[in-house]
Amino acid sequence: MTGLFLYPKRRLRKLIRDGEYAEAVKFGESIRGNFEGDHDFMFIMGSIYYMVEDPRKALDYFEKAASLGEDVETLKLKANAHLDIGDKDGAEQCCRQVLKIDPKNPEAQSLLEKLEAL
């Protein structure tokens, strides 16, 4: 059990796996200062906030994760968070960024087509 305390991200993932989202948020916020430059941590925290339906807070973490290194998964979740808060332009921008990385990404293509049709 000491491994969970030596590896805080492992503990965070365990809390998520166990469905203890409130505890995961509390723990994650308590250790954030140690992981400001850690893409994986920012992605995990953004995902937790997205799961607990706090898209604005999720977006803060996804923005930070994307600034540390763009990847398709972060950008797709970031697009969804933008949609959840009613930011169509932000969602479109994320889809375009995904398509720069993965030009044939079907999810980003489909969402972008839907957004452009609105």
Image (spheres, grey):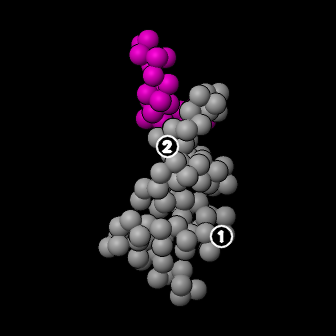
The residue positioned 55% from the left and 74% from the top of the image is: 92
x%, y% of residue 111? 47, 75
Above or below residue 43? Residue 98 is below
Instruction: Return the disc, 2 or 1, that comes first in the chain's sequence.
Output: 2
x%, y% of residue 24? 56, 32
- Secondary structure at badge 1 equals loop
Q: Would residue 22 be counted in the magenta stretch? A: yes
Q: Can you tell which quarter of the image residue 71 is in?
A: bottom left
Towards the viewer: 6 or 37: 37
Q: Which residue is mark 1?
A: 87
| Figure disc tally | 2
x%, y% of residue 85? 67, 64
In screen coordinates, is 92 left or right of 40? right
The residue positioned 58% from the left and 60% from the top of the image is: 81
Secondary structure mostly taken by the magenta-highlighted segment of the chain = helix
Q: Residues within 10 Å of mark 2 (few under 14, many from 20)?
A: many
Disc 2 + disc 1, Cβ < 8 Å: no
Q: Which residue is mark 2?
A: 39
Q: Which image quadrant: the C terminus?
A: bottom right
Q: Is residue 27 visible?
A: no
**Boundaries of the magenta span:** 1-27
